[in-house]
Amino acid sequence: MTPQHIVDEIMKADLFSQWLGIEVLAIQEGYSKIKMQVRPEMLNGLGIVHGGIAFAFSDSAFAFACNNRNNLSVALDTSINFLKPVHVGDTLIAEAKELHNGRSTGLYQITILNQHEQLVSIFKGNCFRTGKPVVKPSL
C-alpha cells in the first residue's frame, strides 16, 4: 500500500478536509503538500480569515504526513504561529515535513505559504502512533 493510496482513502472519509476544498499535491512517506482556496464563509467577525481555518488546513497536512505509512497516528500536541493574515481569495499551500519518525511518536513541521509565497503560519505537531492500520489490507 503506497502513501498516496492511504491518503486517498483518508480523504474519502474526511468530510472536513473536503469542505475546506483541499487538493492533495504531493505525498511521500512522512511528507504531504496540499492546497486550498480561501472562501468568504471562512471569514471571522474582523474581516480576515478565522485562525481556525489555517489551523485546520495545517492539521490536515499533518494528518496526511503522519498517517501515510499506514500506522494510525493521532495528535498529542500541536501549536501554531500566525505570521500574516489570510484573506478571501488567497490560495494557500501547506507543506508538512517530518522532523522525527519514532516507533511511538512523530514530530512534524507544517508551513503555509500564500499565493505570493509569503509565510502565513508555522504549525508544529507531535503525534502518537497507535500501531493500528489506517487502511486495512484487502484479502
Image (spheres, rainbow, N blue to C red):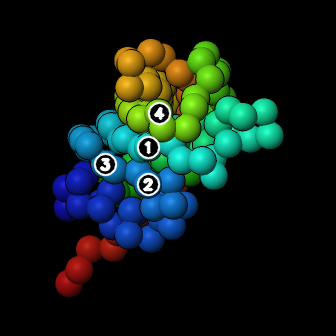
Which class describes the residues within 10 Å of circle 1: few (<14), some (14-19), or many (20+)? Answer: some
Q: Residues within 10 Å of mark 2 (few under 14, many from 20)?
A: some
Q: Is residue 135 left or right of residue 48?
A: left
Q: Which residue matches tag 4? A: 90
Indicate the quadrant containing the N terminus: top left, top right, bottom left or bottom right: bottom left
Image side of residue 139 versus residue 6, left or right: left
Secondary structure under tag 3 reads strand
Tags 4 and 1 touching, CB below 8 Å: yes
* Type of the residue with mark 2: Gly
- In this view, the residue in front, 112 or 44, is 44
Disc nearest the viewer among 4 and 2 = 4
Task: Return the residue nearer the eye: 105 or 89.
Answer: 89
Q: Amino acid at mark 4?
A: Asp
Q: CA distance from mark 4 to mark 2?
A: 13 Å
The residue at which mark 3 appears reads as 24
Q: Is residue 15 above or below residue 107?
A: below
* Helix, strand or loop under label 2: loop
Q: Is residue 79 above or below residue 24?
A: above
Q: Disc 4 on helix, strand or loop?
A: loop
Q: Which residue is mark 1?
A: 37
Instruction: Give the residue drawn at x 67%, y 42%.
Output: 43
Q: Nearer the viewer, mark 3 or mark 1?
A: 1
> Is residue 36 in view from this perspective?
yes
- Label 4: few (<14), some or many (≥20) within 10 Å? some
Q: Check if mark 2's residue and mark 1's residue have beta carbons within 8 Å.
A: yes
List x then y, in percent, for residue 117. Answer: 38, 18
On the image, the x and y values in percent for residue 51 come to 68, 35
Q: Which mark is residue 21?
A: 2
Q: The residue under label 1 is which amino acid type? A: Gln
